[in-house]
Amino acid sequence: MSNKIQSIRGMNDLLPESSPLWQFVEEVMRRTLKEYGYQEMRMPLVEKTELFKRSIGEVTDIVEKEMYTFEDRNGDSLTLRPEGTAGCVRAVIENGLLRGQPQRLWYMGPMFRHERPQRGRYRQFHQIGVEVFGLEGPDVDAELIAISARIWRELGIGGVTLQINSLGSVHSREQYREQLVTYLNGHHDQLDEDSRRRLQSNPLRILDSKNSDMAELIRQAPLLEDALDDSDRAHFERLKALLEIMGIEYEINPRLVRGLDYYGRTVFEWVTDMLGAQGTICAGGRYDGLVEQIGGKSTPAVGFAIGLERLVELMEEQSIPFEQQQPDAYLVIAGEGMVEAGFSVAEKLRDGIPGLRLITNLDGGSFKAQFRRADRSGARFALVLGEDELSSGTLTVKDLSGEREQQTIPLDDVAEMLSRYN
Ligand code: HAM
């Protein structure tokens, strides 16, 4: 008995039955981003490990525990990208895109994290990421949130809540960090092992702890909000005002700190309670220091990424209708020696009817067998080509739903007939 080779845990196949929904989601996003003047970027799936260490942060879950890192044949340490922002920043610097005007960019594709797989959490998952470079004010933060809100509307999704917070600039965060460390040091005995380790390296992440024993300690911790300086505050106030003008509801979540180190000022997440524990479908924020950190000239930047698996699951959960991709017609070939004629008729139909979804019977089979295949294909109509039809330039059209009588019509009328039933 031969052993079947299985897929890697947490890495999924996208099956034909699900691809129409994915394509619908991707199309809505592409269209919306184009309408706002954003351009697509495509970056490699693999980057130097150093890039992620320097941008996401050495003491984050992603870099410490979740990266797929390997040595290539030259002995260089490479990593499958766990997210897109770092690679996008590397690419815009390297290709000189930061000279001159602002850049509004997006990308789509797989990301890799060695997390414990569960519903909504995979080891290969897909993001649509959006990044803007060169705009400092809160207006662009507001625009990005508006884009995400529009995407939910266009997709017909409900039940998602916007949470926002401000992490302050580097300077105010430093001050806050000191306050927080003093407070947490005063309660050192209540910290779990992870938090003790983070106390030196990344104390803000302790606020993000899911350990319920520490919930009270965290609740009473000093608030980052109180440490914001005047310009941070003005940035955040303006963002809130713009969201209100656009009628986008939000909640302020003072505990929202995000799991990647590069953020400052605005951070936000769209969350739902319909997906169990993994309820964040979209997350992002400002990262004004990152370009410089990776070797570019200081450039403000802000962005977000949508988790496509979670979004698609939410749409399924909400039974959101989308365009199915059933074929319109199935061409049945009747009679000996008609296969070649079938090819030319099929191509002629495709030339004349843009968008026609036509399946041609291939590999022969009896008339009955062909009809069985036509039925199984999900096509609405069978188009029958026999010798009579060929000589008279017609096709016999059979409605496979059984609603209408079979009829023989000129080839040129097929387009009009199909369109009547679409
Ligand atoms: P992130 O919060 O790590 O941010 O990921 C963004 C989204 O990707 C999450 O909200 C979630 O929907 C999805 N996601 C993350 N991990 C998984 C997983 N293991 N399985 C399924 N879905 C997942 C970033 O990646 C930032 N680069 C976002 C960003 C762009 N910030 C600024 N620009």
Image (cartoon, rainbow, N blue to C red):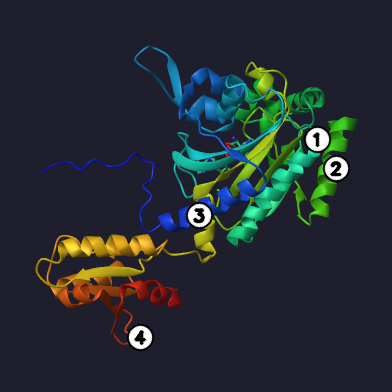
Lower position in the chain sequence, tag 3 or tag 2: 2
* Amino acid, disc 4: Glu
Q: Which residue is mark 4?
A: 403
The answer to whether residue 223 shows anywhere in this view is no
Asked if the residues shown at circle 3 and circle 4 are in contact, with their CB atoms under 8 angstroms apart, the answer is no
| Secondary element at tag 4 | loop
Label 1 to label 4, Cα distance in Å? 60 Å
Task: Please give the residue where the numbered disc 2 appears in the rendered image.
Answer: 238
The residue tagged 3 is 312
Amino acid carrying mark 3 in the image: Val
Q: Residues within 10 Å of mark 3 (few under 14, many from 20)?
A: some
Q: Nearer the viewer, mark 4 or mark 2?
A: 4
What is the distance, in whole Å, between disc 3 and disc 1 at their CAs?
32 Å
Tell which tag, 2 or 1, sits nearer the viewer. 1
Residue nearer the viewer, 201 or 62: 62
Q: Position of residue 185 (x, y in %)?
A: 74, 24
Q: Secondary structure at mark 1?
A: loop
For marks 3 and 1 on the same chain, the one whose residue lies earlier in the sequence: 1
Q: Quadrant of the N terminus?
A: top left
> In the image shown, does 9 or 128 lie closer to the viewer?
128
Other residues around mark 4 within 10 Å, as few (<14) / some (14–19) / many (≥20): few
Q: Amino acid at mark 2?
A: Arg
Please say if the residues under marks 3 and 2 sit with CB atoms less than 8 Å apart.
no
Tell me how far mark 2 sits from mark 1, CA to CA. Answer: 9 Å
Q: Quickly name the residue at label 1.
A: 137
Distance of label 4 from label 2 (alpha carbons)? 59 Å
**For residue 114, above or below residue 159:** above
Residue 231 in view of the camera? yes
Give the amino acid type for the residue marked by disc 1 in the picture.
Answer: Gly
